[in-house]
Amino acid sequence: MKSRIVKTIYNGVAALTVGILVLSCSVGRNYSRPELGMPDAYSGPATETDSSIARVSWDEFFTDTTLQGLIRRALTHNFDLRVALTRVEAYQSYAKQAKAAWLPALQAQATASTSNPSENSLNGISLSTFLETSHIEDYTLAATASWELDVWGKIRRYKEAALADYLQTFEAARAVQTAVVAQVADGYYNLLMMDAQLTIARRNVLLSDSIVQMIQLQKNAGEATQLAVQQAEAQRQNAQILIPQLEQAIALQENGLRLLVGDWPGQVARTAQLDDIPVEDRLTSGVPAELLAYRPDVRASEMALKAANARVGVAQGNLYPSLTLTATGGLNAFEASNWFSTPASLFSVASAGITQPIFARRALKTQVEVARAELEQREIEFRASVTTAVHEVTNALIRIDKARAEQQVATQRVETLNQAVRNAQMLFRSGMANYLEVISAQSSALQAQLDKALITRQQLAAQLELYHALGGGWGQ
């Protein structure tokens, strides 16, 4: 009996070796990145190409400690990011399962049965005549192992697809992280801008109070009319109405930030002001080809393409014969008392089979055609993601360049109009200017200050947009 089991194992190993020798006949093609024809540099404003700010971790790029704290909390508690990470865990399990595809499937089974045939049946007569019994008992404890040999490389392609799916979810999670970092920073900059505008509005209310008092005194002296007082009062109300509007916007923005960090509505403690956030004079963008390494959404798109390429091989492999080895061994007896008597109760069975699909109502051919169509679709999506990324970086560079020019003009405009307000007040006191010139100068100065705060925020948003477009924000 032992020699028979050894012989069975030897035959199984021999068949397995033969199967391994033909593994070179792999279906499908190995993945190679499509030719993209990417430009050597970004068009638009000149930028340094020897490095990229995408290499800078978010805690180095953002130096404000309050912002760093918000980002750190968001990376732990943001709901979208947590969902993305659970997808990574799920597909990691699929990848582990695919690694075991070459291992045999092993099953154990224990059965016990009793059969009582009719006494007038052939089985009943045979039992009573030859075995002198009226029933049949059978007791089996067996283990069965089966292997599907990867003759055509179908299992290898399946493993490639599963690994690429896992890496796609991993890169997708990184893409969510970069988006969350950008959203938190953008919301924080927006909050600081509204803080600055609220300060400007309150300062202008105080200035309007002094102008109203000054015109009221001139009216009392007979040098101004009630109309002048009313128009000055209306100008003060224009500044006053901004205060509740900005306070509402600030409260909503604080709630929006707290939602991003997975917290309940409430205030966001902060000490920094808009002008405290540094605006970099020069940011390095690197070259477009680096997007393939740093942009997680681009990398996720390429992983989807790689998985689709592997699935074409799996679908093609289903058209060819599959070779399966099966080995079963264990204990078998027709009496319970002899069930575990060895070696007499030992048994073994070994078999090998080839299955060739012939007619499956065109299902297998359809799977190949669909897999190829999905491969073409993923390639188009990959090219689109790369092209979109290059456009986003280029647009961010343009916005940075133009926002810098706007900021210079806005700063000069604020200085000019602030001086105009002071001059108008002095001329009004000396009777050389009327109240309309004072009100007009103050109104223009208020708008210029609000615009300057908005442009400063746009500068910060533009450099944040570049950082995000280059793929920064996922490392630490």
Image (cartoon, rainbow, N blue to C red):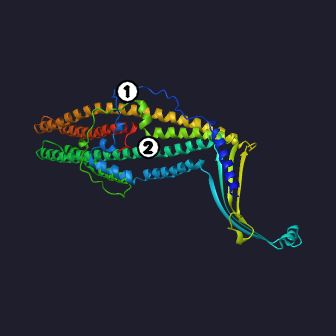
Q: What residue did someone put label 1 on?
A: 44
The quarter of the picture where residue 229 lies is: top left
Task: From this view, report whether residue 349 is shown above or below residue 42.
Answer: below
The quarter of the picture where residue 122 lies is: bottom right
Q: For the N terminus, which image quadrant?
A: bottom right
Q: For the C terminus, which image quadrant?
A: top left
Residue name at image x 64 percent, y 39 percent? 21
Secondary structure category for the residue under label 1: loop
Count of number-bearing discs: 2
Q: CA distance from mark 1 to mark 2?
A: 26 Å
Where residue 368 sits in the image (x, y, percent)? 66, 39
Contact flag, marks 1 and 2 (Cβ < 8 Å): no
Secondary structure category for the residue under label 2: helix
Query: Can residue 234 be seen at all in this image of the molecule?
Result: no
In the picture, the disc for residue 352 is none
Q: Is residue 257 left or right of residue 362?
A: left
Where residue 336 sits in the image (x, y, percent)? 71, 71
User: Callout 2: few (<14), some (14-19), or many (20+) C-alpha neighbours within 10 Å?
Assistant: many
Where residue 269 sits in the image (x, y, percent)? 27, 54
Q: Is residue 155 left or right of residue 33?
A: right
Mark 1 or mark 2: which is in front? 2
Query: Mark 1 or mark 2, which has the lower sequence index?
Result: 1
**Looking at numbered disc 2 in the image, what kind of residue is underneath it?**
Ala
Q: Nearer the viewer, residue 231 or 260?
A: 260
Q: Nearer the viewer, residue 172 or 281?
A: 172
User: Callout 1: few (<14), some (14-19), or many (20+) C-alpha neighbours within 10 Å?
Assistant: few
Residue name at image x 39 percent, y 29 percent? 287
**Looking at numbered disc 1 in the image, what kind of residue is underneath it?**
Gly
Q: What residue did someone put label 2 on?
A: 175
The quarter of the picture where residue 334 lies is: bottom right
Where residue 163 sits in the image (x, y, percent)? 53, 44
Query: Can residue 412 be seen at all in this image of the molecule?
Result: yes
